[in-house]
Image (cartoon, rainbow, N blue to C red):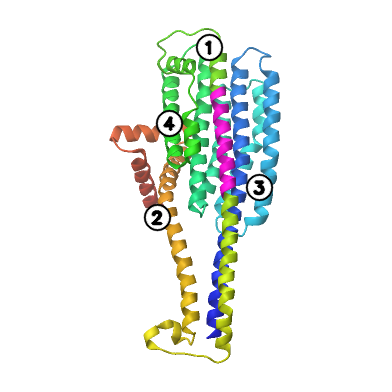
Amino acid sequence: MIANSSTTIRFLLASRQCELNSLRYLLQSGELVGKISQLVHMLQRERGTSNMFLCAMEGQFADELRQREEEVAQAQAPLMAHLDILEQHIAALPQASRLFSHVASVTYALGVLPALRQQIRQRTLRLSQAMSFFNDIIRHLLALVFELSDTAAEPAVSRHLIAMFSFMQGKEYAGQERATGAAAFAAGTFSGDTQQKLVDLIERQERCFTTFADFADDEHRLRWQHISVDSEFERLRRIACTGRETFAADSCLRWFALATQRIDDMKSLEDGLANALMAHCRARIAATEQANHQQLADIESLLPLQESEESGYSVFSEAHGWLESDGVRPQLGRSLLTLVVQQSRRLQALDSELAALRETLNERKQIERAKNMLMQHRQLSEDEAYKTLRRMAMNQNKKLIDIASAMLAVADVFQTNP
């Protein structure tokens, strides 16, 4: 009898403590996302400068390239230190397996940077190859952010993470647009493939920024609306996508400068998103700690009732159901039931909200799986795999997610029925 009420109280407190531990993990995740954001930005800058270096005459942009490499090293060090701390704290958690798999991909990708840089300095690497290497490194870093978003167990934090991931992905496509356009302006011509690639990158940016706007708070949504696209950048963008207008000899440098200003403005907004995420995590931790204290106070107020039980008071009444069938006093039983029901309903509400948020993540996850399958089995680059999916969707007049789902369903059949 007494053991049952004591056990109920113990597990109620344990449930609250688990919730608090989860929020503290999300705080660590938010800190990690901020460090990834900084490293991605520096890698984007190095990628852009590398493109300019490879397109320019011998000796140009060499100093800028060394500076970009130093900036990447400065951003990489705190990220690696944070990953070491993360390993010590969450290795035993269920989500750690997939998370650390992504971390392994990130560390391997970063490990190829020294060899990549040497080839760039020696100009033994084609521009397209250099860009592909940088794109892959950044893709692995963004996949890590996506994994953190996918495992977030608190709806409001999940919304923050989805907004930030979507914005970071859109900013990455903006970086690829900058690099692709710079190379073409430097070459003095825009091929049909280059024009189509730029159109695709602009479309993918818009899709990411639309998702960001759906999940972002009002402040950051308004900030994004005020990041205007420079009219001259739009003119150069139009030239790049259509090839119908002539452009000046210095258009390459002008394009790069305008695109860089736009991306730097995005980084400022991205920093605001990271700060808002951290502030929300800290506020939720403080609120949960306060709720824990209140629940503990409520439980302590029941202790005199438990002492009455210990004095031998026991009631059985079929009219009052299971609470009294264990010999628990009616008042204590009803009070414990109220706490249990409140906790259960609150967690159920959180689960329902999370399920709705996961719909957005699942769609992207399926597209990524289908894209990775094409990359693996047909030896395609990420860009080629995406274009293949997009072409199949257009040819069949279907959505991208429908094509991805059908491909995965077929693949599952062959895997389960060899």
The residue singled out by tag 4 in the image is 206
Decide which of tag 1 and tag 2 comes sooner along the chain.
1
Q: Is residue 326 above or below residue 114?
A: below
Real-space Cα separation, disc 1 to disc 3, in angstroms: 41 Å
Tell me the amino acid under the disc marked 1.
Answer: Ser
Q: Nearer the viewer, residue 141 or 219?
A: 219
Q: Please give the name of the residue rendered at 42% of the width and 40% of the height, measured from the top-left corner.
A: 214
Count residues near mark 2 (Cα–Cα under 10 Å), then give few for <14, some for 14-19, many for 20+.
few
Please state the extent of the stretch shown in magenta in the rendering: 261-280
Which element is circle 1 on? helix
Count residues near mark 3 (Cα–Cα under 10 Å), then give few for <14, some for 14-19, many for 20+.
some
Real-space Cα separation, disc 1 to disc 4, in angstroms: 24 Å
Tell me the amino acid under the disc marked 3.
Answer: Leu
Decide which of tag 2 and tag 4 comes sooner along the chain.
4
Image spot of residue 234 (x, y percent): 45, 18
Q: Is residue 320 above or below residue 341?
A: below
Decide which of tag 1 and tag 4 comes sooner along the chain.
4
Give the left or right position of residue 22, taking residue 348 as reference.
right
Give the left or right position of residue 302, taking residue 378 as reference.
right
The residue singled out by tag 2 in the image is 416
Real-space Cα separation, disc 2 to disc 3, in angstroms: 36 Å
Real-space Cα separation, disc 1 to disc 2, in angstroms: 55 Å
Is there CB contact under 8 Å for labels 1 and 4?
no
Q: Nearer the viewer, mark 2 or mark 4?
A: 4
Residue 33, quarter of picture: top right
The residue singled out by tag 3 in the image is 83
Q: Residue 140, can we see it?
A: no
Q: Nearer the viewer, residue 187 or 86?
A: 86
Which element is circle 2 on? helix
Residue 3, quarter of picture: bottom right
Tell me the amino acid under the disc marked 2.
Answer: Thr
Decide which of tag 2 and tag 3 comes sooner along the chain.
3
